[in-house]
Amino acid sequence: MTETPITRQGALKPVLVASHPRSGTHVVMDLIRRQFPSTRNWRCFGLPLDHLYLNLERLGAEQRRFDEQTAKRIVNRPKRALLKTHFTADFQSGWAQDECTPPQGHWRSLGQAAKVIYVVRHPMDVMVSYHQFLSAIDASVVEMDLMRFLHSPHWDKSVDRLGWWQSHVSGWATREDVTVLRYEDVVHQTEQTLETLSTSLDDAGRRRKPLLPPKVTTLRNARLNRLLSVSPQSTAIIADRSRFPAIDWRDALTPADIDELQTRLNEELGHYGYSLDPAKAKTERSG
């Protein structure tokens, strides 16, 4: 039997927030941290914000890898450890080459034993934000229009980027032990979302107003939060919007593009109640 890395007396079952990158992962984690005190954590001034939760990718990352002692400190500070991952549901495929080593041993067991919250978001909003985010990391992405980006290969060449999103969603969201949250419901129907989380975590939590944590939209504010608080309310990873403005997919996609995507994404769009009709999608986003 694998020994658990959690040694805190009276610890509750961990919660793992899983998602494809740019799906609202941090909004959900920060909502949980705000409304469920058992997940509260802190870290020393100036340390990266992912010391407030355990990013499973960091356990085997090529850069800024968490050693055993650091990881154990993170999961044992709160009563309920908060974990995060962008791995696929089988932990075999990661979002980036330098963060593709799956958790091993008791860390793998911890992730598999956790209560899992999966965050899904409108696929085009995900891809637009992902394109914007990767533009600051990969120079080749900057020159791609949206459709070219969707068709470009995932780093391991196994499938294109849109296909990886599809396999990511189907792998996690079809598991019976997973609670699925739509990002749009998290931000527009927060009270109902909290009811769902309370049931999943078996924790009444609280209803701190406003329900959602404050939104951080600039790199400057994100850095100030990191420097001035041991437990910032937001852990959001901010894209460089001034250098890499987001594409509006409703303007970028042609009718032929939408027809192609409608055929390809028909199952996901229908299951999660999303639309590729520009007018309907605008209504969905505004709640």
Image (cartoon, rainbow, N blue to C red):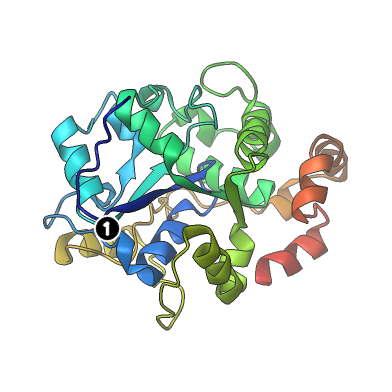
Left or right of 281? Residue 222 is left
Q: Residue furthest front?
A: 1
What residue sits 53% from the left and 58% below the top?
200
Left or right of 154? Residue 139 is left
In the rendered image, residue 34, in percent from the top left (x then y), is placed at 36, 69
What residue sits 80% from the left and 52% below the top?
276
Q: Residue furthest left?
A: 44
Tell me where residue 241 sits by quadrant: bottom left
At label 1, the amino acid type is Lys
Residue corresponding to mark 1: 79
What residue sits 53% from the left and 70% below the top?
194
Asked whether residue 150 is in view, the answer is yes
Q: How many marks?
A: 1
Nearer to the camera, 206 or 168: 206
Q: Quadrant of the N terminus?
A: top left
Asked whether residue 247 is in view, the answer is no
In the rendered image, residue 157, in percent from the top left (x then y), is placed at 58, 16
Tell me where residue 227 sits by quadrant: bottom left
Q: Secondary structure at mark 1?
A: loop
Q: Residue furthest top?
A: 157
Mark 1 Cα within 10 Å, few/some/many (few <14, many 20+)? many
Above or below, 163 relative to 284: above
In the rendered image, residue 9, in percent from the top left (x then y), is placed at 20, 52
Tell me where residue 275 sits by quadrant: bottom right
In the rendered image, residue 40, in percent from the top left (x then y), is placed at 28, 62
